[in-house]
Image: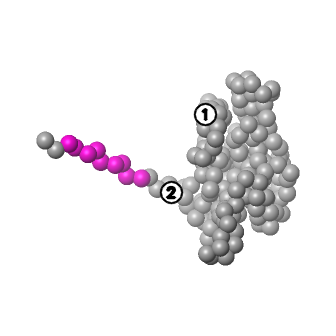
Amino acid sequence: MRFVGIDPSTKTGFVAMDQGGIVLKAKELKGLGSVDPKRIVTLTDEIMAHVLPGDVICIEGVPFDTQRAAQAGWIHGSIRNALFRRNLSYYEAAPNAVKKFVNVTGWVGEVGHKKRLVGKDKKLAVMKAVEEHFGFVHASDNVVDAYILAEIAKSIWWSGNISNAKPNYQHEVIDAILNPVTKPKKKKKVAKV
């Protein structure tokens, strides 16, 4: 049994760990070239070459605030289609849930004087939190995010056995993945005559 984290992007983070939390594979995957669709197709093939039947997989959800929304959607969709074709199921964690799992909110400072973390500062905060929580260090923030996703997959799998050993914010992430809240549909307004 392996736990796999996939952080989809043009530089996709991939981590596979065993049941004891030993990292078996941690790498950044890029595909071939810089022109799509070749890059995305070969990136997807590269990811699928590392995934095995029986893996418990957690993949990061599509970010809503990306400047390259079409490309992000293409990459995410390509990976999910490939997993589906191989009959491999996966859990999906929202980008903010990935950060929350290591207690990074995106803000620093005291109440009334908080500063929003953006860009490199946010990535560094996540990398530091992962090192503090799990002792994992990697030069690529994409691989670090994939590591968090693998930890989430492991926590979901073990949730019936050792769930009380986790901090509350990690319980909240796991619960949100396993029991998503669906928003009620808005009622259509009927024009009065």
Q: Amino acid at mark 2?
A: Asn
Give how far apart the Cα atoms at labels 2 and 1 are: 28 Å
Crowding at mark 2 (Cα within 10 Å: few <14, some 14-19, many 20+): few
Q: Is 18 on the left or on the right of 157, as rendered?
A: right
Of the residues tagged 2 and 1, which is closer to the observer?
1
Residue 72, position as x, y percentages in the image = 64, 37
Residue 60, position as x, y percentages in the image = 65, 47
Crowding at mark 1 (Cα within 10 Å: few <14, some 14-19, many 20+): few
Q: Which residue is mark 2?
A: 179
Residue 64 visible, this orientation: yes
Residue 70, position as x, y percentages in the image = 60, 34
Q: Give the tally of numbered discs.
A: 2
Q: Secondary structure at mark 1?
A: helix
Q: Amino acid at mark 1?
A: Ala
Q: Which residue is mark 1?
A: 70
Depth check, front residue: 2 or 142? 142
